[in-house]
Image (cartoon, rainbow, N blue to C red):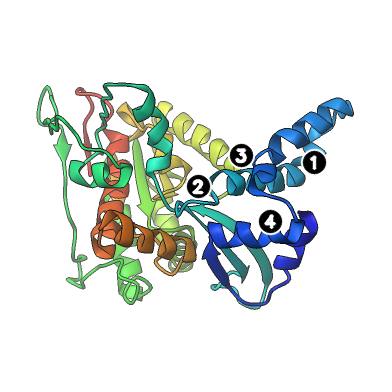
Amino acid sequence: LLEYVREKMQAERVVQESARMFSHQLVNSLQSDTRTLRFCSERLKSLLFTLEITNVAEFTPLQLLCDFATLLGTYGHTRSFGVIFEPFDERLPSIPDPILQLACLDASLGMKPVFDRFQSVVLTSGTISPIEMYSKILGFNPVVSRSLTMSLARKCICPMIVSRGPDQQPISSKFELRSDKSVVRNYGNMVIEFAAVVPDGVVVFFVSYIYMESVIQQWNDTGVLSRIAEHKLIFIETPDTIESSLALDNYRRACDQGRGAVFLCVARGKVAEGIDFDQHYGRCVIMLGVPFQYTESRVLRARLEYMREVDHIRENEYLSFDAMRQAAQCIGRVIRSKADYGIM
């Protein structure tokens, strides 16, 4: 198995194929059958246990390979998965970085055991709109659908859409405009103005890590960061989980001590998905653009193709739905109870 995968990863061009095709070729090469693949992961665990190996972490790469084979053996006969090999990242084509991915194309697989086991299932969330899209993606017919308004004790949300800067130049996160100096400058001026008047915590979301790094570099060169720092401390989320956790702890400490802080982070990152900025930790959340997915991703392209053919969901329909859901996730970080309030 290891030799077969190693040989596959020597390729110098992108290869995309169905899990069915990949598993068929693999089984022929190993002169075995898919049932053998299905128990790969369990057999490795059993072997490590039998040999009384204590440093199991040393075998993590092998465990990953066996998990890959087990999933392939379990779902390889369906259309629910695709196998994608990329010899390098398209954004850095000169650096070899081979990745072999088993991509799940069918989101309903995760919910199927729940629907099979229980007669009645209730799905509820503050960001589950539009409801019709979820039923298509998760493969069920809702018996009852309700959309309820928020029960707020008073008017405590101030939503605003800013389309022009103080110099009346349009600001946008469109790919062709987002790196424009006037757009970056106006985003910076907006953050400075809010940092000056909003008490306690301000959270700023960027559409991607690459864009955030580019903007922060320009803000540093033009003195925007130092002007923000006159009003509040600045903390930045990074792809490193430990660094981000440390930044988050210090951000909370700055808010607790009354100094106030600005947290620069990324939509779809760790902060956007699971961290609450309730009470004084988030009195303002700023989204610099709409967080659309990177549409050149081959995994996303495969998923969109699957949804178009099987779920009859158009590409633009899904991408807009996904971006709005992510925006709602980010913006919703600051309102965590009916007594909370904030600017969005």
The residue sitting at the right extreme is 51
Q: CA distance from mark 3 to mark 1?
A: 23 Å
Image quadrant occupied by the N terminus: bottom right
Q: CA distance from mark 2 to mark 3?
A: 10 Å
> Horizontal and vertical percent for residue 244?
54, 42
Check the image and report above or below for 2 versus 46.
Answer: below
Check the image and report above or below for 183 versus 262.
Answer: below
Pointer 3 local density, CA inside 10 Å: few below 14, some 14–19, many at least 20: few
Res. 126 image quadrant: top left
Image quadrant occupied by the C terminus: top left
Q: Earlier in the sequence, mark 3 or mark 1?
A: 1
Label 1 vs label 4, nearer the camera: 4
* Residue at image coords 54%, 58%: 20
Judging depth in this view, the residue of 204 and 26 nearest the camera is 26
Please say whether residue 199 is visible from this viewpoint: no
Q: Which residue is mark 4?
A: 27
Q: Earlier in the sequence, mark 2 or mark 3?
A: 2
**Label 3 residue SS:** helix
**Label 1 residue SS:** helix
Query: Mark 2 and mark 1 in contact (Cβ < 8 Å)?
Result: no
The dot on residue 242 is 3
**Label 2 residue SS:** loop
Q: Which residue is mark 1?
A: 59
> Horizontal and vertical percent for residue 329?
31, 42
The dot on residue 303 is none
Label 3 vs label 1, nearer the camera: 1
Q: How many marks?
A: 4
Q: Earlier in the sequence, mark 1 or mark 4?
A: 4
Q: Amino acid at mark 4?
A: Val
